[in-house]
Amino acid sequence: MTNNFNPKSSIILGMHDAIVSLVGLIAGLCLTFNNPDFIIISCIIASITAALSMAAANYLAVKATNKNIAVVSAIYTGVAYLATCVLLILPFFVFHNRLIAILSVFAIAILIIFAFNLAFYRGKRFREHFNEMLKICGIVTVAAFFIAEIANLIFGI
């Protein structure tokens, strides 16, 4: 067992999961509810609880193979998750129009993915990783749209 800690995997875990889950949640909430305050509150609660959950899960996963870096890895994951969520929720504080806010969320998510991949990957690997992350986020967002539409039909909200 090595004590060397490479933060990239912990940051990927937190950042990517935050983008996938929160952008999907935001898309679903925007299509279901008109009140931006409800969207903000729901996203803040989901962000904090999910960041804690991701940090705890990462701690347990890393501890199974290298307990010396488990705490540090968990902190990186939780902070990356929460920082990403803050950036994604920010447009709802700035824009009262839900359409402008959600378009801003999409743009911020793409910029986060771009910046992360630019920082950690070069050349062909950059394009591969960027495209893969973007596709996964897109698929989850589309799925959230359909889940919200089904919920609207079932519950009449």
Image: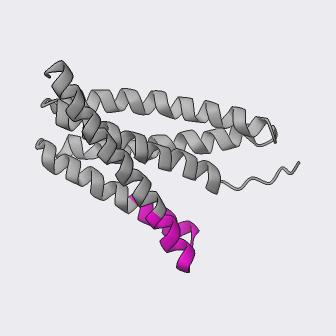
Nearer to the camera, 15 or 136: 136
Q: Most extreme residue toward the right, as rendered?
A: 1
Q: Residue at x 14, y 47 (%)?
A: 99
Identify whether 35 is placed above or below 75: above
Nearer to the camera, 145 or 73: 145
Q: Left or right? Give the position of 80 relative to 63.
A: left
Q: Residue at x 16, y 29 (%)?
A: 33
Q: Left or right? Give the position of 41 relative to 128.
A: left
Residue 150: percent from the left, percent from the top? 23, 30
Nearer to the camera, 17 or 131: 131
Q: Residue at x 41, y 33 (%)?
A: 47
Span of residues in magenta: 112-131
Q: For residue 18, what is the image quadrant?
A: top left
Q: Residue at x 37, y 50 (%)?
A: 139
Q: Most extreme residue toward the bottom, as rendered?
A: 123
Q: Left or right? Give the position of 103 relative to 25.
A: left
